[in-house]
Amino acid sequence: MTQLAKKMPKKFLVIRWSGMGDVLMTLPAIKWLRGQYETCHIAYLTDIALAEILEKSEGINQIETIDRQSFREKGRRVSALSGALKMLYRLKRQRFDRVFDLQGFGETAVIALLTGAPSRVGRVKKSLLRRRIYNSPIQADWEHEHRARYFLRAVAESCGFSAPGHVDPPRLPFKQGNRPTGRPVIGLNIGASTESRRWSEHNFFALAIRLSRSGFAVRIFLGPQETFLAPAVKKICAENNWEFFMHQRLNPLISAIADCTLLVSNDTGPGHLAAALQVPVITLFSTGAPENVRPLAASAKWFRNVNDINLIQVSEVEKACLELTGGSSLPRMPVF
């Protein structure tokens, strides 16, 4: 591309509104797009619950949101619909040159069409509707490529380029305050989107006991979907002097993860958030494929058992924790 072409103003819209990890894994594609079109305007449509991630990222000029949760609540549907229609009106007025629908839902395909953008990029998925809407179908392999590479290929190839061989990992610029003095903190994220993908809280508790005996402070994370676990987790945290952290918003979660020396997580969004904050990560998988969705942390390990995630041994995860942190800071006590 000529230098003149790189400086020609263009307007792009990116759509991805589900999955904290997936939104994070679109960031390398955003970085590439900004590098190729220096003066372009990049707008991003996402769920309101994930907007704080994009507010901390670089290269995005405009964030538009949709409150998908409100559509599920009877008393809030009218206001949610009103907000969505206003958002669509704003997008249409901006006359985007190209829309990258990296979500691939029927409703996001319709949004791409309603913007009036002449170039619409998306994954067809054997859908006649999407085949008619997307005039630049994504050729990248959703099933076998790492998600970050998939998004990068989708964006680069639709612009007429070959995707670079190397994918720069997602990174969130974050100015961490002074870490508290004392024992290093290992975070344990015990939630997951489905029960089959969740290493039992009892395994996490057993791991926490072992890590405490090795001299680490423990911070246990719960999200909005795991409120049913809160009473039991609060109780055992109080008994063992562990920190209990239940997040409703992303900014406090970002700060709490950034303060950790290591995060152990099921295959879910906070693991990707830790990687983007350059915190070492251990990820526990069941049905998910690590080669497709593992966090791109510089220092990371993962374990997988496709039959039963709870067959992953506590001792194996403990060993990985000690390897990634450099081991204990206190004399080790026996584990009974």
Image (cartoon, rainbow, N blue to C red):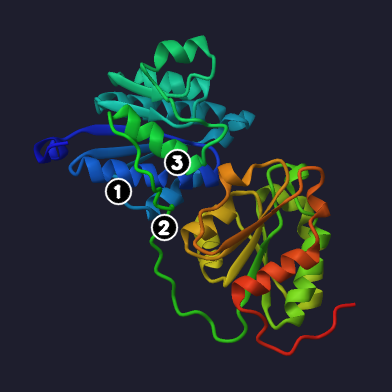
In which quadrant of the rendered view does residue 219 lie?
Answer: bottom right
- Which residue is at the front of the view, 26 or 257? 26
Task: Report, in whole angstroms, how far the alpha carbon at label 2 lies from the one at label 1.
Answer: 11 Å
Which residue matches tag 2? 172
The nearer-to-camera label among 2 and 3 is: 3
Q: Position of residue 90 (x, y in %)?
A: 31, 29
In the rendered view, tell whether residue 154 sits above or below residue 281: above
- Which residue is at the front of the view, 266 or 107? 266
What kind of element bears circle 2?
Answer: loop
In the rendered view, tell whether residue 30 sits above or below residue 233: above
Left or right of 116? Residue 213 is right
Q: Position of residue 307 (x, y in %)?
A: 81, 43
Q: Which mark is residue 59?
A: 1
Q: Position of residue 218 (x, y in %)?
A: 68, 73
Q: Looking at the image, which residue sits at the far bottom?
A: 331
Which residue matches tag 3? 149
For badge 2, the amino acid type reads Leu
In which quadrant of the rendered view does residue 318 lie?
Answer: bottom right
For badge 3, the amino acid type reads Arg
Circle 1 Cα neighbour tier, 10 Å, few/some/many (<14 / 14–19 / ≥20):
many
In the rendered view, tell whether residue 28 sits above or below residue 68: below
